[in-house]
Image (spheres, rainbow, N blue to C red):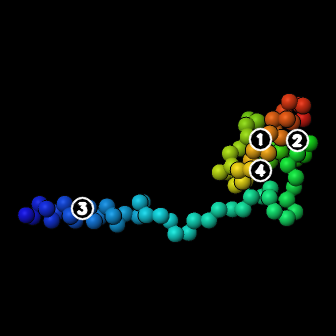
Amino acid sequence: MKKNNKKRNTQSNFAKLSIFQPQKYKFKKKCPLSGKGAPKVDYKNIKLLKKYITENGKIMPSRITSVSQKKQRELSLSIKRARNLALI
């Protein structure tokens, strides 16, 4: 009988771990390319495009730059256009 009590205690300890619980203070930054006064995503706007490219020339992911999905697609398309035209 005592062995069963030990098993119950270990199960309750796993439930108490904070790793498995959701975080209370999760917040996400707003997209810097959408909203009022945001710059327009265009292949000719090289200053803007260089902010979202690494030193090696790769496009930075949206989880790092906090850009929305829609704007990320526009951004990647305009970066690829600028590459084809040798602007970057």
- Which quadrant of the view contains residue 4? bottom left
Amino acid residing under circle 2: Tyr
Amino acid residing under circle 3: Thr
Amino acid residing under circle 1: Ser
Q: Evaluate whether residue 53 shows in this view.
A: no
Quarter of the figure with the N terminus: bottom left
Q: Which mark is residue 10?
A: 3
- For the residue labelled by badge 1, is the local secondary structure a helix, a strand or a loop? helix
Query: From the viewer's perspective, is the residue at label 3 or at label 1 nearer?
Result: 1
Q: Which mark is residue 76?
A: 1
The answer to whether the residues at label 1 and label 4 have Cβ atoms under 8 Å apart is no
Mark 3 burial class by Cα count in 10 Å: few <14, some 14-19, many 20+: few
- For the residue labelled by badge 3, is the local secondary structure a helix, a strand or a loop? helix
The answer to whether the residues at label 3 and label 1 have Cβ atoms under 8 Å apart is no
Q: Is residue 5 left or right of residue 31?
A: left
| Residue ID at (56%, 69%) | 25
Q: Earlier in the sequence, mark 2 or mark 4?
A: 2
Q: Earlier in the sequence, mark 3 or mark 1?
A: 3
Mark 2 burial class by Cα count in 10 Å: few <14, some 14-19, many 20+: many
Q: CA distance from mark 2 to mark 4?
A: 13 Å
Q: CA distance from mark 1 to mark 4?
A: 9 Å
Q: Which mark is residue 71?
A: 4
Q: Earlier in the sequence, mark 1 or mark 2?
A: 2
User: Circle 2 sits on which residue?
Assistant: 43
Q: CA distance from mark 3 to mark 4?
A: 48 Å
In percent of width and height, residue 88 lies at: 86, 36
Amino acid residing under circle 4: Lys
Q: Which mark is residue 42?
A: none
**Up-down relation of residue 48 to residue 38 (above or below):** above
